[in-house]
Image (tube, coloured by chain):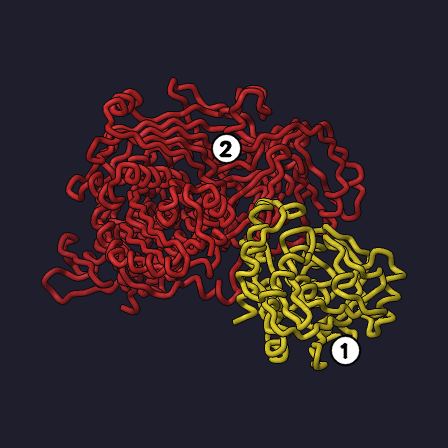
Chain colours: A red, B yellow
């Protein structure tokens, strides 16, 4: 029956036809009748008292329709932007959760904090008026770094948050760790910084809001990874709009990486304003605006210690981290450096005791939240750097120390001392595969060749595991989640046998329209072309939690698989009636329902037709129609992992690090579309390499100005930074997801930073270098070489 | 972008008259710096005077001992010019390293030189080769032209029409690109003439500058080893989030060596 393209095939991506021919439909492409333009006025100061706003000149400016401020929002009794996660300290005291007004009230707390919204007939008029708005600031000293923010005498962001500490959080058995450290033959220590990142999706954020008085309904088009969650958070908690009166549409979205998985104040302001002005309003962020308002990622300062016995076995791991939250709590903010960080500190090792303390800290910077990997790259970086430091100090080979501590394949399922239980995995198999793929045995020859050109070559390993497929709701609830994390799918079979799937995940580059269609094509035996995937519209899709945390295939795909199974079950009932057989005798295979052991057959199309034209149909016991829905809540996280090996060459004259080889062998469970998985790994690795070598969000210490606020100053990784990557999979099947899938969206960013930095340190280890902070820029490497114990030979 | 008047004169005197009569009006050549500045509303000129319709400002001519490049010649044309490649290969290499393909197709030599961005490439080539800036009213030696951060000797109504480069015996350019912008973090142009060597540095300070000790050393021995031990004073060098002043100073030496290498290869 047609062109079945199923699991394991690599068809070209369905969605690329429109993306590559300029026929995508992004928020900024949408035009509504009578549409106006909105512009946000943002704080130019990192920290200031908002003494007053004089709207008169702005309101008098040509074309201006409205100027709205925090006072107007307060007068309308609008809510604060909600945080979706509530964590507590060791004594059960909840985190400090100061309000996050959608437009600043009383104070501004970061450069980019929103102060006013100007609506005018055209964007030019709105910009003109925005410049005329008179805002009276009393500038206060800013504090941007976590170390500085917790010091006595530091500027305080909130009156009721002493020392700027939102929460002093911990996980693990502190006493057991202390005992183990007392018995240790060796203790390795490491201080490091996990650099602050800016996501930079290709499409800047944008929104259009419209209010229809006839139906009393609002529509918000927004660049979001989770429109249903925006509807819930914004409607129920901020603007008091009933859910059935609010439609949120996230059409084609040009990349997210986490940046678009939060409910932003801009969405609430524009929706509220649309009713006040009774006209549609469009706002499109500039790239510069994105830099100071898109949520940032990472930004940790960490002290770690590893206790080992005399053979190099890990006895205990202790980690103390200061995590930057920025000026307010964003949607998932406090969850990222705690629940998505500390439980991964076991890595792929049998470390019996682990303790982690995280101080979550407010600073005068853009709020920090999830960015691809979210917590898990930070954990992997600490652990995999620590392992290398310990190996070096104890004189044990870096691969050997990993082998001595790795969880053997037979030990799965494996319960770690930090909450999570890994269901499946084979880290040793990934390591062995990667050693061969990276041609490690001939590394010495390549190193000698580099040396002959005056270059230092290094090799770095990262054997890692992550937790994704967010998330088992009950488990997440115990950790402080304020929402569920299941997913839903509806499979609508049309009378002619084609299929439309409505799914609650959101596709913004991941290739869902292809991967999900392959699942349906395989399971129902329908043509790949006969399956459409619908997402991103709360009026069309039943419900959903969206796309982030490598959850779409793991959780959404499972819901889709279940809904498809229900279609088959119903189809069998219809087929049994039409074939005058018992339901238990009906088999379904390759798009055909048959009576076992006979040649009596009904095609999937015939069954679909019968379901919608039920003349000969068991109406007494079965409803007409062929449409099924399933919700799926996972029983556990999934645990993809693997081994990444980076090879770098350092030019000691300039300090330039060149990535010359990159190998990844990853366990992502069942692979639906190998080409898409490969692409996800490539993209993730490039972003991880970006963090390791190039990207850094830098603030001025005293003024709170973002110094890396443009593509001219914030270095994104580029194609010519990358070698051809060797990427392959070594999969074990997840034991609890319906198809054995584990997720692959974030593994690249999680495994790669440690591999790259371990390689850089290896290249410089003969000079006594033991650690390099990210990004390993030429200036930073040159400085290390200047300070190294041995002088660099002049050419 | 704020509103502005737009003029497209066909004669240089008309363009000069517009510049004089409309205060704060701006010339636009390729627009590679000006247009982004306007889009970010950082500049608000009342009028733009577009040079694209002026005749005879494009093209490269061989005058024997010199090569003349019209002010409106795009970087890509210079980079691909067989004439430049054969007479001053270092200059063709420099042009090929500016920005990205889009910038090289639109951006012009006159625009770059008139803008005098402290990290632009052309000022190093122009000063390093001791070129002459030909304007609507006079000729200016490169040594008298670049006056520091975005400042030049140009008068308000003066328009660059061409740059005239003496053909050197050898010349080379080495550039350490700023990782994000790909402007020169440090770029060094060296040129050897019968009467001596010139060394010009861009990116390191507030404007392009020459390095007399390196020039003296290379005049005696045009070899990378001649400059390897010459250290640059960090006074006046730029320190920013991309590079500290002492690192820039170090790079001047490294890039000078590499520029000499390139000139010799």
Question: In the displayed image of the protein, which residue is found farthest to the left?
Answer: A597
Instruction: Give a yes or no on whether discs 2 and 1 share a subunit.
Output: no
- Give the quadrant of residue A767: top left
| Residue B48, x across and y down, in percent | 79, 62
The residues tagged by marks 2 and 1 sit, at their Cα atoms, a distance apart of 58 Å
Whether residue A260 can be seen here: no
Residue annotated with mark 1: B56
The secondary structure type at the circle numbered 2 is strand
Q: Residues within 10 Å of mark 1 (few under 14, many from 20)?
A: few
Q: Nearer the viewer, residue A154 or A423?
A: A154
| Residue A250, x across and y down, in percent | 50, 50
Query: Which quadrant would the N terminus of chain A be assigned to in this image?
Result: bottom left
Residue annotated with mark 2: A325
Q: Nearer the viewer, residue A626 or B51?
A: B51
Question: In the displayed image of the protein, which residue is found farthest to the front?
Answer: B220
Which residue is at a point 69% across and 29% down the rendered structure image? Answer: A139
| Residue A461, x across and y down, in percent | 31, 48
- Give the quadrant of residue A81: top right
């Amino acid at each position: 029956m047609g062109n079945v393209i199923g699991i394991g095939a690599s068809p070209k991506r369905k969605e690329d036809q429109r993306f590559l021919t300029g026929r995508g439909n992004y928020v900024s492409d949408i035009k509504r009748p009578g549409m106006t333009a909105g512009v946000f006025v943002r704080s130019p100061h990192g920290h200031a008292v908002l003494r007053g706003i004089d709207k008169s000149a702005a309101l008098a400016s040509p074309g201006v329709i409205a100027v709205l401020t925090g006072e107007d929002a307060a007068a309308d009794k609008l809510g604060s932007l909600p945080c979706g996660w509530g964590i507590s300290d060791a004594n059960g005291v909840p985190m400090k959760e100061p309000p996050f007004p959608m437009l600043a009230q009383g104070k501004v707390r970061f450069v980019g904090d929103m102060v006013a919204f100007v609506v005018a007939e055209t964007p030019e008029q709105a910009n003109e008026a925005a410049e005329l708005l008179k805002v009276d600031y009393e500038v206060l000293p800013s504090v941007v770094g976590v170390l500085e923010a917790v010091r006595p005498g530091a500027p305080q962001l909130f009156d009721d948050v002493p020392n700027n500490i939102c929460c002093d959080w911990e996980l693990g058995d502190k006493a057991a760790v202390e005992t183990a450290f007392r018995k240790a033959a060796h203790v390795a220590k490491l201080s490091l910084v996990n650099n602050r990142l800016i996501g930079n999706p290709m499409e800047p954020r944008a929104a259009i809001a419209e209010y229809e008085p006839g139906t009393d309904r609002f529509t918000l088009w927004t660049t979001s990874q989770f429109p249903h969650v925006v509807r819930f958070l914004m409607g129920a908690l901020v603007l008091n709009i009933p859910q059935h009166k609010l439609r949120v549409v996230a059409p084609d979205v040009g990349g997210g990486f986490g940046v678009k998985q939060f409910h932003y104040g801009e969405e609430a302001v524009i929706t509220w304003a649309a009713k006040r002005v009774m006209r549609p309003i469009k706002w499109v962020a500039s790239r510069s605006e994105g830099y100071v308002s898109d949520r940032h990622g990472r930004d940790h300062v960490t002290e770690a210690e590893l206790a080992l016995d005399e053979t190099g076995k890990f006895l205990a791991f202790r980690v103390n981290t200061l995590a930057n939250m920025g000026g307010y709590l964003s949607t998932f903010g406090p969850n990222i450096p705690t629940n998505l960080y500390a439980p991964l500190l076991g890595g792929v090792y049998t470390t019996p005791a682990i303790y982690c303390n995280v101080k979550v800290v407010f600073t005068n910077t853009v709020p920090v939240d999830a960015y691809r990997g979210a917590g898990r790259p930070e954990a992997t970086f600490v652990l995999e750097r620590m392992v290398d430091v310990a190996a070096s100090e104890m004189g044990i080979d870096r691969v050997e120390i990993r082998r001595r501590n790795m969880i053997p394949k037979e030990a799965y399922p494996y319960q770690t001392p930090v909450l999570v239980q890994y269901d499946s995995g084979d880290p040793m198999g990934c390591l062995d595969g990667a050693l061969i793929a990276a041609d490690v045995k001939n590394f010495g020859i390549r190193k000698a060749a580099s040396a002959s050109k005056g270059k230092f070559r290094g090799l770095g390993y990262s054997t890692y595991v992550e937790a994704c497929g967010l998330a088992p709701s009950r488990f997440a609830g115990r950790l402080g989640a304020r929402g569920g994390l299941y997913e839903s799918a509806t499979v609508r079979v049309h009378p002619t046998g084609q299929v439309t799937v409505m799914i609650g995940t959101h596709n913004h580059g991941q290739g869902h329209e292809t991967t999900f269609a392959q699942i349906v094509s395989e399971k129902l035996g329908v043509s790949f072309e006969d399956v459409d995937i619908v997402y991103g519209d709360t009026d069309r899709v039943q419900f959903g939690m969206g796309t982030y945390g490598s959850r779409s295939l793991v959780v959404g795909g499972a819901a889709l698989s279940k809904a498809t199974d229900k279609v088959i079950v119903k189809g069998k009932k219809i087929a049994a009636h039409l074939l005058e057989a018992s339901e238990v005798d009906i088999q379904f295979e390759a798009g055909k329902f048959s009576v076992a052991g006979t040649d009596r057959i009904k095609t999937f199309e015939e069954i679909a037709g019968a379901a919608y034209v039920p003349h000969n149909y068991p109406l007494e016991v079965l409803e007409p129609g062929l449409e099924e829905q399933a919700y799926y809540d996972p029983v556990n996280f999934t645990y993809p992992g693997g081994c990444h090996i980076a090879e770098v060459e350092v030019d000691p004259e300039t300090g330039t690090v060149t990535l010359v080889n990159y190998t990844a062998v990853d366990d992502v469970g069942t692979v639906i579309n190998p080409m898409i998985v490969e692409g996800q790994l490539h993209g993730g690795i490039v972003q991880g390499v970006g963090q390791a070598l190039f990207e850094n969000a830098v603030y001025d210490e005293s003024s709170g100005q973002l110094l890396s606020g443009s593509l001219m100053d914030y270095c994104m990784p580029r194609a010519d930074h990358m070698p051809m990557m060797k990427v392959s999979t070594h999969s074990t099947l997840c034991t609890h997801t319906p198809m054995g899938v584990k997720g692959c969206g974030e593994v690249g960013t999680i495994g790669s930073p440690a591999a790259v930095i371990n390689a850089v340190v290896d290249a410089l280890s003969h000079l006594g270098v033991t650690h390099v902070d990210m990004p390993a820029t030429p200036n930073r490497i040159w400085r290390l070489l200047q300070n190294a114990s041995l002088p660099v030979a002049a050419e | 972008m704020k509103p502005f008047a737009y003029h497209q004169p066909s004669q240089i005197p008309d363009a000069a008259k517009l510049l004089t009569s409309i205060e704060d009006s701006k010339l636009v050549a390729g627009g590679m710096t000006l247009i982004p500045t306007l889009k970010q509303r950082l500049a608000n000129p009342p009028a733009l005077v577009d040079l694209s319709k002026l005749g005879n400002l494009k093209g490269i001519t061989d005058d024997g001992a010199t090569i003349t490049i019209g002010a409106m010649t795009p970087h890509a044309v210079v980079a691909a010019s067989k004439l430049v490649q054969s007479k001053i290969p270092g200059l063709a290499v420099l042009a090929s390293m500016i920005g990205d393909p889009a910038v090289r197709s639109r951006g012009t030599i006159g625009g770059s030189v008139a803008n005098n961005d402290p990290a632009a490439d052309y000022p190093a080539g122009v000063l390093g080769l001791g070129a002459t800036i030909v304007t609507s009213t006079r000729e200016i030696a490169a040594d008298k032209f670049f006056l520091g951060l975005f400042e030049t000797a140009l008068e308000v109504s003066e328009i660059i029409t061409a740059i005239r480069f003496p053909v050197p015996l050898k010349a080379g350019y080495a550039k350490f690109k700023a990782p994000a912008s790909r402007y020169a973090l440090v770029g060094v142009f060296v040129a050897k003439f019968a009467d001596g060597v010139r060394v010009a540095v861009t990116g390191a300070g507030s404007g392009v500058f020459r390095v007399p000790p390196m020039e003296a050393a290379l005049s005696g021995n045009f070899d990378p080893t001649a400059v390897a031990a010459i250290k640059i004073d960090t006074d006046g060098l730029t320190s920013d989030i991309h590079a500290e002043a002492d690192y820039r100073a170090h790079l001047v030496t490294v890039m000078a060596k590499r520029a000499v290498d390139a000139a010799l290869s």
